[in-house]
Image (spheres, grey):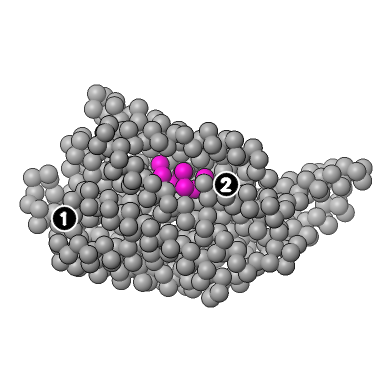
């Protein structure tokens, strides 16, 4: 090998602390934009259902079909994009897909009423594209874990990487607050369809910023190792592989490798925990407006206010759990948070209807401990796998969250199937509360217990 070519290739791998700061900001914006579109549809469900005359069971049923499509799209991002085309490309594709879903939802909204069942199918297919936006969080976790690790290895840092990532993951409550605010402002002006227009513009911003991102050093190193091995430059390839903890090419697909060797235990435990927890996410985050309006008999505008307040609290939850995970370990932090979330939501559901202040307080505490641990979880996922399977395993686990949402949607639909728009308000309220208790709080408790079965990983481990 030409020494100059060798040095140039190695120089291309290097990233600076400034590169990492820029990547962190871009990932935060990408996740915020993706979340805006992803939660907008769920928050608007009560309005969409009323506008189109859906029953409670029809509403949850349609949302379930949307979730199925979302899961399929989110799953294929890891194996087909991030572990093959690169982390940088994955970020841009995910946000662009979310923006496309928003724009097309605006168009589909006008067609649902005119086309009947065909319009519903079109709406479900379009909303499935939101799976690209949902996949953004696992891409961010993989990408930033590798960027932080590279710089920490050179500078001897790493003690606060979880807290820094929590700032990125806090794009969830930020995006949720922006979504709720846009509903409050735009929906009275032009109907629910107008709210989705806002989600189109981030695509242009991310295309511009994405060109300036540096690719992950580990991904570039893996590309070089593969290239040099195929060219017969074995010594250089093995030296680089040792430096970046890259294993031998086995010919096994990343998905199959995620279910073997050291990856098997984290794949199984984290997937099961994610699946169970997302039943709770569906109940209290995505169907939060439905639980509050139908279950706790809060009017829609007050429900939006509660969402804004609770998501602002959730922002603090991300920072707290990111900080705590750096100190007591991410696995224990996640499990503790989810145990407390289940108790808070149970208290909120059992609180007397009309006790607005208590509902706000307990719902906010619940979201603080339900979504806050995700700032530790997504980073914990990335730390639990070798570079060869990291993005694929992360995408698989992430997609299992959507499977949990699908399961939750089916269970909610069955539980609510006896209700009609003419049912008594008291019957609707008690049925929704029972459904949220059984299919929301109990799965959150199970997810906390499952997290304790995962292999603990020392915070700041170099990967």
Say whether residue 458 is left or right of residue 332: right
Which secondary structure type mostly characterizes the magenta part of the structure? helix
Q: For the residues carrying marks 2 and 1, which lies nearer the camera in this image? A: 2
In three-dimensional space, the C-alpha distance between marks 2 and 1, rounded to whole angstroms, equals 40 Å
Q: Nearer the viewer, residue 272 or 382?
A: 382
**Disc 2 packing (10 Å; few <14; some 14–19; many ≥20):** many
Residue 441 locus on image (x, y percent):
30, 65
Say whether residue 217 is left or right of residue 120: right
Q: In this view, does 304 lie above or below 274?
A: above
Residue 119 locus on image (x, y percent):
29, 28
Query: Considering the image in quadrants, where does the C terminus appear?
Result: bottom right
Q: Quadrant of residue 367?
A: bottom left
Q: Name the residue under label 2.
A: 26
Q: Which residue shows up at 25% across the image and 69% down it?
A: 347
Say whether residue 304 is left or right of residue 167: left
Indicate yes or no whether the magenta region holds residue 35.
Answer: yes
The residue segment tinted magenta is 30-37
Residue 429 locus on image (x, y percent):
15, 57
**Residue 151 appearing in the image:** yes
Q: Which residue shows up at 18% across the image and 42% down it?
A: 55
Query: Considering the image in quadrants, where does the N terminus appear?
Result: top right
Q: Which residue shows up at 17% across the image and 36% down it?
A: 53
Q: What element carries label 1?
A: loop
Q: What element carries label 2?
A: helix
Mark 2 vs 1: CB contact within 8 A: no
Q: Quadrant of residue 356?
A: bottom left
Say whether residue 59 is left or right of residue 309: left
Q: Which residue shows up at 24% across the image and 37% down it?
A: 188
Q: Which of marks 2 and 1 is nearer the N terminus?
A: 2
Q: Mark 1 points at which residue?
A: 297
Q: Nearer the viewer, residue 221 or 397?
A: 221
């Amino acid at each position: 090998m030409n020494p100059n070519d060798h040095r140039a290739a190695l120089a291309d791998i290097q990233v600076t602390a400034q590169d990492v700061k820029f990547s962190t900001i871009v990932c935060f914006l990408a996740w915020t934009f993706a979340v805006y579109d992803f939660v907008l549809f769920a928050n608007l469900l009560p309005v969409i259902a009323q506008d189109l005359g859906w029953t409670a069971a029809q509403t949850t049923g349609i949302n379930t079909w949307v979730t199925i499509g979302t899961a399929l799209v989110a799953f294929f991002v890891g194996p087909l994009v991030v572990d093959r085309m690169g982390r940088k490309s994955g970020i841009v594709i995910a946000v662009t897909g979310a923006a496309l879903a928003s724009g097309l939802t605006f168009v589909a909204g006008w067609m649902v009423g005119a086309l009947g069942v065909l319009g519903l199918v079109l709406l479900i297919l379009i909303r499935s594209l939101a799976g690209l936006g949902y996949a953004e969080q696992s891409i961010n976790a993989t990408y930033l874990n590798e960027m932080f690790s590279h710089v920490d290895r050179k500078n001897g840092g790493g003690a606060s990487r979880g807290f820094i990532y929590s700032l990125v993951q806090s794009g969830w409550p930020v995006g949720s607050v922006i979504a709720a605010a846009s509903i409050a402002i735009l929906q009275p002006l032009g109907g629910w369809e107008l709210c989705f227009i806002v989600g189109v513009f981030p695509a242009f911003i991310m295309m511009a910023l994405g060109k300036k991102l540096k690719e992950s050093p580990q991904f570039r190193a893996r590309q070089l190792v593969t290239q040099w091995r195929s060219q017969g430059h074995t010594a250089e390839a093995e030296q680089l592989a040792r430096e970046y903890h890259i294993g031998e090419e086995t010919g096994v697909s990343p998905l199959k490798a995620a279910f073997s060797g050291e990856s098997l235990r984290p794949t199984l435990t984290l997937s099961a925990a994610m699946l169970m927890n997302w039943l709770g996410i569906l109940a209290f985050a995505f169907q939060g407006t439905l639980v509050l309006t139908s279950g706790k008999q809060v009017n829609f505008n007050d429900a939006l206010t509660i969402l804004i307040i609770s998501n602002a609290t959730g922002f603090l939850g991300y920072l707290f759990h990111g900080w705590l995970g750096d100190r007591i370990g991410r696995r224990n932090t996640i499990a503790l948070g989810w145990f407390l979330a289940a108790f808070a939501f149970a208290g909120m559901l059992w609180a007397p209807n009309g006790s607005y202040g208590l509902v706000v307080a307990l719902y906010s505490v619940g979201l603080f401990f339900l979504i806050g641990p995700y700032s530790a979880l997504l980073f914990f996922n990335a730390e639990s796998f070798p570079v060869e399977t990291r993005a694929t395993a992360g995408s698989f686990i992430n997609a299992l969250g959507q499977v949990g949402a699908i399961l939750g949607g089916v269970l909610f639909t069955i539980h609510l199937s006896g209700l009609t728009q003419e049912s008594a308000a008291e019957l609707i309220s008690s049925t929704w509360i029972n459904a949220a208790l059984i299919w929301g709080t109990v799965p959150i408790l199970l997810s906390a217990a499952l997290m304790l079965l995962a292999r603990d990983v020392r915070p700041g481990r170099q990967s």
